[in-house]
Amino acid sequence: MAATRAGPRAREIFTSLEYGPVPESHACALAWLDTQDRCLGHYVNGKWLKPEHRTSVPCQDPITGENLASCLQAQAEDVAAAVEAARTAFKSWSAHPGVVRAQHLVRLAKVIQKHQRLLWTLESLVTGRAVREVRDGDVQLAQQLLHYHAIQASTQEEALAGWEPMGVIGLILPPTFSFLEMMWRICPALAVGCTVVALVPPASPTPLLLAQLSGELGPFPGILNVISGPTSLVPVLASQPGIQKVAFCGALEEGRALRRTLAGECAELGLALGTESLLLLTDAADVDSAVEGAVDAAWSDRGPGGLRLLIQESVWDEAMRRLQERMGRLRSGRGLDGAVDMGARGAAACDLVQRFVREAQSQGAQVFQAGDVPSEHPFYPPTLVSNLPPASPCARAEVPWPVVVASPFRTAKEALALANGTPRGGSASVWSERLGQALELGYGLQVGTVWINAHGLRDPSVPTGGCKESGCSWHGGPDGLYEYLRPSGTPAQLSCLSKNLNYDTFGLAVPSTLPAGTEIGPSPAPPYGLFVGGRFQAPGARSSRPIQDSSGNLHGYVAEGGAKDIRGAVEAAHQAFPGWAGQSPGARAALLWALAAALERRKSTLASRLERQGVELKAAEAEVELSARRLRAWGARAQAQGHTLQVAGLRGPVLRLREPLGVLAVVCPDEWPLLAFVSLLAPALAYGNTVVMVPSAACPLLALEVCQDMATLFPAGLANVVTGDRDHLTRCLALHQDVQAMWYFGSAQGSQFVEWASAGNLKPVWVNRGCLRAWDQEAEGAGPELGLRSARTKALWLPMGD
Amino acid sequence: ELDLSWISKIQVNHPAVLRRAEQIQARRTVKKEWQAAWLLKAVTFIDLTTLSGDDTSSNIQRLCYKAKYPIREDLLKALNMYDKGITTAAVCVYPARVCDAVKALKAAGCNIPVASVATGFPAGQTHLKTRLEEIRLAVEDGATEIDVVINRSLVLTGQWEALYDEIRQFRKACGEAHLKTILATGELGSLTNVYKASMIAMMAGSDFIKTSTGKETVNATFPVAIVMLRAIRDFFWKTGNKIGFKPAGGIRSAKDSLAWLSLVKEELGDEWLKPELFRIGASTLLSDIERQIYHHVTGRYAAYHDLPMS
């Protein structure tokens, strides 16, 4: 008989039945680092870039602290080189037919499949996450992402006709949670024809490895460039000429700061912020399964952040008992161990959670910790925080990994109020076996993703994103593609940066206006007042501004709106919102059609007012007719909202819902005083928003004429029109925290201000940077872009089975 | 004893349980010595079973010998486990073979219990009177554990009181013998029914609840097991009584048996990992475990003739 290999411990284990170590060999990860001589540079244009005279940062094993490699830190010129490579690559990459790009993505998926062990061991080694999750989850999903987007690329010419790739995308990633964050964004960008420069934090080798795998595939070396460097490089990257979009994923305050920094810059900004998730546990739930949902969310290395847990009071004791019991069985340890639930996340994450838990305790919370967790730094046990006073700072703050903050609610209505009462709008799960209740909560939650009786499911075909302060950028599904597309023929984004724009004083004071005589001319006296809450009101300032016609004569006076009037208008819009959003698309369409008919009845008045602004009579009549057509068209288009997605491996549908944004502020352009006003009003209303509009500054009278019809047709507050100084009103709207989105068509400076001010509540903004738009053209005046910007997506997962 | 409020409010979400079942198999593995020790432990949980129409005293005798000596002696010595007295937990046979088994085990000089299936196994579609009589006869023959099948029609029509009464009568007929109640989960229609039947069986005094007969199309599966284990935990929390769990049918590989051990460890805890509270009903599993132990000890893969058959 051969020599025995059995160790001495079998006897003890036979009695204790404990788990042993299941180490995953990371030899291949180390061997790959050796090929780089343990010194990682940047991967640019299909080659390693290791410039001299750069500082380097050590890449350490987060658990042992062992030095794995040193990583060179990029400087501005390295960034420039990467962007240049991406610009060059963009010319050929975007010119190729989608099928060619699809082939490249599929080849990359195959390469990942062949080298997946290298990928998962390297990722787990440097991030400290449980290798099981990387191996069975992330690496598989990465391949699915490439395959899904390859299909999108191959059908791009038909399916996405009328759209073109933006150009070079700057991608900014947070200190690595998972390389998937990069995959979610580069896949759609590359698929539609964009090229990417990714700025990753120091010491993130996996993105570099992926760039290398992609680069070595051959013909398109410069499409994916990865540079690693400090966050101070973010503005450098964003302001490189040629960068058309910056996709940022990371912490809330960093995103907010970046929004302010990039105001007026040429690059568009997409933000995906925060990591917290939410779980609603009702008394009609399978509590044990909901507890597993909490484990999936916070204690399994699947999601990046912590969890806010709302439990119905009647099952509070039961849920807490099961939760605590389950926590006791969690295992934490070295990520490369195949039998742990949680790894470690490095010193920074550990410090963050320690601070949070200490503060929560000092604010009166109860803290429960359990699980089989190594006691040394940087491991941190699964933590359950309860009894946190609702008004305490910790109850408002974002919950860090691996903490679950539990609080009770009494009714489903209260659950919605509590859940929607946070500034975050990422993802949430609802646990209830009652279909009606689950759907009510699922539709009511203001978040980007809702899972019913599940948590943390992901699929390439399902859009993932958020609203409110989670940022409004999307990845996955059709929404992920549109992030990197713009309507064909749109000129490349230009910078409208005005360095000496003073944000503190822009639009602060209203220039005083004096009476300029009395109205003359044939037309009847124009309507006067601010159209707020369904009727014309006198402005708070009790003053007016004169409006001239094209020959310089006085056309009429309009009310001088101010901050208080904006406040009133936003309030009125909010009051009207629930009723309007609850209407069926058909009912909304009927109202828009009624307005269209009213417009046609008023045609002669409107045309004569347009004539006084210097428009030929024929053109004026055409503008009125086109406006009426726009109203009817949007009413019809909004009928088809959202659709059902089928997801591999999931029984049951995923609904892609298109929900209204809320109160939308619209600052109309000077030109096309009627058509532009109606073209913006129609999609906004059709998708269920209520609006506060600032009409054309040159001729607001047309909009006020329309208001006369809205006063009789529309519910009060649905559309509010405030006239006055445009800069001043823009300032009030852009800084308003309770305006959910803003469209601005005015000056370059105004655009820059709106972008800067939107950082306050991170409302999505759409600005024209002082460029004129052809409102009479179908593409620019009524294109699908307006529909996309008028609503936000929500993915509702409905797994089924009995 | 019967409290229908324990089952009236229960909710079991099928897809969520399926996901948990998938995860639990991927999240825990054991390697090296741990694997060897766990496999030996698994041996002590096995109800070594033969339930065939062609069972005779000779293959029952061979089965009993294998129950007494489940792993080759030199392998146990190499693992320093020879003196642990490792045997299977019981042998499980048809009522007519109980006498053979008792005799064979006595001859082998050991006190491994004999389990007998009863009550019209596997379908349970005979008269209550004959089913009860079957139990009494098996006990008389020397079976100390009785695996009864429940009347599925009572579950499917929601007659929980009637189900409770029947199992109470089984319990009475068993006398001192252990009562293992087979739920035949493959025929109960839904996981919610599995939970309810588990609860009723425990309230009626079962010592074990068992997944299946091994004769249905769907046998011991992880989703079903998760629901039954959760019911066992709920029952323990409500009454303080620990009820045993026995998966049976379709558990053939050593790897499967490890997954079942970790499932019980994860859902109920270490105190359930003993033969009084956990059994695995299996016939071919033992030889695969022995094969793995052989490999662990020698570093080689065993040929068919290297290990004695059961």
Image: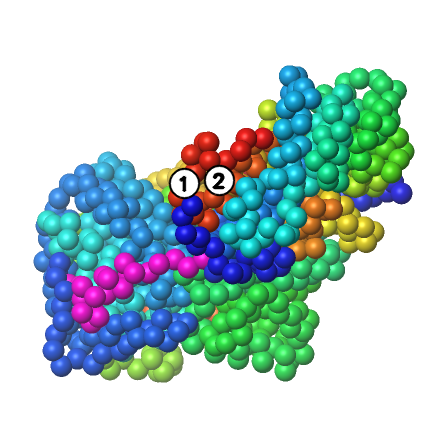
Closest to the observer, A394 or A179: A179
Specify how the rendered protein is coloured.
rainbow
Q: Secondary structure at mark 1?
A: loop
Percent position of residue A322, x then y: 68, 57
Q: Chain of mark 1?
A: B
* Residues packed near mark 2 inside 10 Å, few (<14), some (14 to 19) or many (20 plus): many
Residue at the spot of label 2:
B291
Percent position of residue A756, x then y: 34, 73
Residue drawn at x 51%, y 61% as measured from the top left? A8
Q: Secondary structure at mark 2?
A: helix
Label 2 amino acid? Arg
Q: Chain of mark 2?
A: B
Which range is magenta? A22-44
Residue at the spot of label 1:
B301
Residue B13, image quadrant: top right
Label 1 amino acid? Tyr
Q: Is residue A359 magenta?
A: no
Percent position of residue A490, x then y: 20, 53
